[in-house]
Image (cartoon, rainbow, N blue to C red):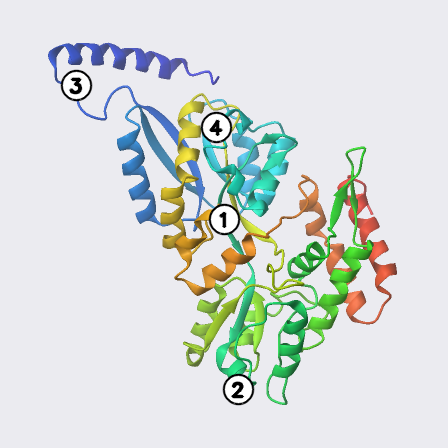
């Protein structure tokens, strides 16, 4: 409980006034007696109109609560959240939106409430997207509740596919390779895939049954790029990347792949659908020519297990309005507001059973199909340190330039293991 003597005195005065007003029959609607739930949401996650609709409905149906929604910047948010989780005054948040891969670091600091005590089955936990639910779950305890997701799909030129005689997008990896090779010509490259696009690589590794790192029996984490499954994923990436002219020593932002695609000589890229806006701004001539399909899996039964980005909702342990905070989380994660948010912001809803809400938007529908198989990075607070000086990128470039994959994989895995153990190189 936070120490709020001033607020307690004010509340006592308000309650006394409320009793007098009630006796006179003139208690104003929605006034005294409401407790404030402070909610931190991230800039760009939703719209002002959505927040207006949600706030009005929530306060109407929860007469004892008032919402104070505060928008935060992503830059520096980790340090700000860590400070808020230790805060004991009136300004501390009661609900926080966090990136799905950030939950582990806040759990590690013992600052989050265990939400497993709530009726999670009533919240639809059995249908939650795995790429959002798994990073928020530690053992049998759920600290992060999935809010929304976004993931990579294949953005492609429908006109170039038609010219190559490809009538429909590929549904298997083998067909994808064959179609991409068919799309190559003296004028166009079948795909633009940068050599260090490690998020895309991760999906191929997961499809093969491998992982970037695994948890050992002693509770420590170890890099696992050297496993046969992970090596098969890297081999597919190598074969696909070789069918285009993407740089082998850079990631998808150097140079930005939207700009490369906009030049009009690329048939496909792997990216979030929202990148189409930047492509069409750079080259208006491509409007009406772009389509989407899920990244293909090994078989047509299901698409690739892509990396799922997005946000979870957490409740700080230091909140003194836990029932109100969990009511906000339950509402935002519930079917009504999930559908509203997905349609408003072109996101993937947090449950596989809600995918039909975005069926009319081709890019989002392709995302939703992939998100059903989605995954996230290893759920350890040290993973951010791996990404900061990413040995996976170095490994990928080494393989794409002819080095022995097994040797380089062992070297990269050893680096990951040291970082996850907190040891310097």
Could you classify mark 4 by the number of other residues whose Cα lies within 10 Å: few (under 14), some (14-19), or many (20 or more)? few
| Horizontal arrangement in the rendering, residue 236 relative to residue 338 (left or right) | right
Disc 3 is placed on an element classified as: loop
Location of residue 332 in the rendering, given as x and y in whole percent from the top left corner: 41, 39
Could you classify mark 1 by the number of other residues whose Cα lies within 10 Å: few (under 14), some (14-19), or many (20 or more)? some
Name the N-terminal-most of marks 4 and 1: 4
Name the N-terminal-most of marks 4 and 2: 4
**Distance Cα–Cα, label 3 vs label 2:** 72 Å
Q: Kindly identify the residue that appears in the image at 84 percent across and 49 percent down.
A: 414
Location of residue 141 in the rendering, given as x and y in whole percent from the top left corner: 60, 29
Q: Kindly identify the residue that appears in the image at 70 percent across and 68 percent down.
A: 195
> Residue under circle 4?
119
Residue that lies at the very extreme toward the bottom in this rendered image: 186
Could you classify mark 2 by the number of other residues whose Cα lies within 10 Å: few (under 14), some (14-19), or many (20 or more)? few
Task: Say which mark, if any, is on residue 163.
Answer: 2
**Distance Cα–Cα, label 4 vs label 3:** 34 Å
The image quarter in which residue 105 lies: top right
Q: Kindly identify the residue that appears in the image at 65 percent across and 61 percent down.
A: 200
Q: Kindly identify the residue that appears in the image at 49 percent across and 26 percent down.
A: 118
- Judged by depth in the image, the label closer to the viewer, 2 or 1, is 1
Name the N-terminal-most of marks 3 and 2: 3
Q: Is residue 18 above or below residue 55?
A: above
Task: Say which mark, if any, is on residue 27.
Answer: 3
């Amino acid at each position: 409980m936070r120490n709020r003597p001033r607020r307690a005195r004010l509340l006592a005065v308000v309650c006394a006034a409320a009793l007098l007003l009630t006796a006179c029959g003139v208690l104003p609607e929605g006034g005294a007696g409401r407790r404030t739930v402070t909610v931190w949401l991230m800039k760009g996650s939703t719209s002002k109109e959505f927040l207006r609709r949600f706030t009005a409905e929530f306060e109407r149906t929860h007469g004892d609560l008032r919402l104070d929604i505060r928008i935060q910047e992503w830059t520096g948010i980790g340090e700000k959240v860590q400070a808020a989780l230790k805060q004991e005054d009136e300004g501390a948040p009661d609900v926080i939106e966090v990136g799905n891969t950030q939950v582990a670091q806040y759990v590690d600091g013992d600052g989050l409430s265990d939400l497993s005590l709530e009726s999670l089955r009533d919240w639809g936990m059995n249908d939650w997207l795995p790429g959002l639910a798994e990073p928020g779950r530690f053992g049998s305890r759920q600290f992060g509740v999935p809010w929304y997701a976004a993931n990579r799909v294949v953005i492609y030129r429908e006109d170039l596919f038609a010219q190559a005689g490809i009538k429909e997008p590929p549904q298997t990896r083998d067909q994808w390779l064959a179609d991409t090779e068919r799309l190559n010509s003296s004028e166009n490259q079948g795909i633009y895939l940068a050599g260090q696009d490690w998020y895309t690589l991760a999906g191929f590794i997961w499809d093969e049954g491998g992982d970037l790192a695994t948890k050992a029996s002693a509770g420590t984490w170890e890099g696992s790029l050297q496993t046969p499954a992970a090596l098969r994923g890297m081999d597919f990436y190598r074969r696909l990347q070789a069918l285009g002219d993407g740089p082998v020593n850079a990631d998808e932002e150097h140079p930005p792949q939207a700009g490369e695609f906009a030049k009009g000589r690329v048939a496909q890229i792997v990216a979030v659908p929202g990148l189409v806006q930047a492509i069409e701004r750079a080259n208006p001539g491509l409007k009406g020519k772009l389509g989407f399909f899920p990244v293909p899996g090994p078989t047509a039964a299901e698409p690739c297990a892509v990396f799922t980005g997005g946000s979870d909702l957490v409740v700080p342990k230091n909140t003194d309005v836990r029932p109100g905070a969990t009511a906000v989380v339950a509402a935002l994660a519930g079917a009504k507001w999930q559908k509203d948010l997905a349609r408003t912001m072109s996101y993937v809803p947090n449950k596989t059973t809600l995918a039909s809400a975005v069926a009319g938007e081709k890019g989002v529908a392709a995302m939703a199909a992939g998100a059903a198989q989605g995954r996230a990075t290893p759920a350890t607070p040290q993973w951010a340190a791996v990404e900061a000086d990413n040995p996976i990128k170095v490994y990928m470039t080494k393989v794409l330039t002819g080095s022995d994959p097994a040797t380089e994989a062992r070297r990269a895995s050893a680096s990951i293991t040291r970082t996850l153990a907190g040891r310097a190189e």
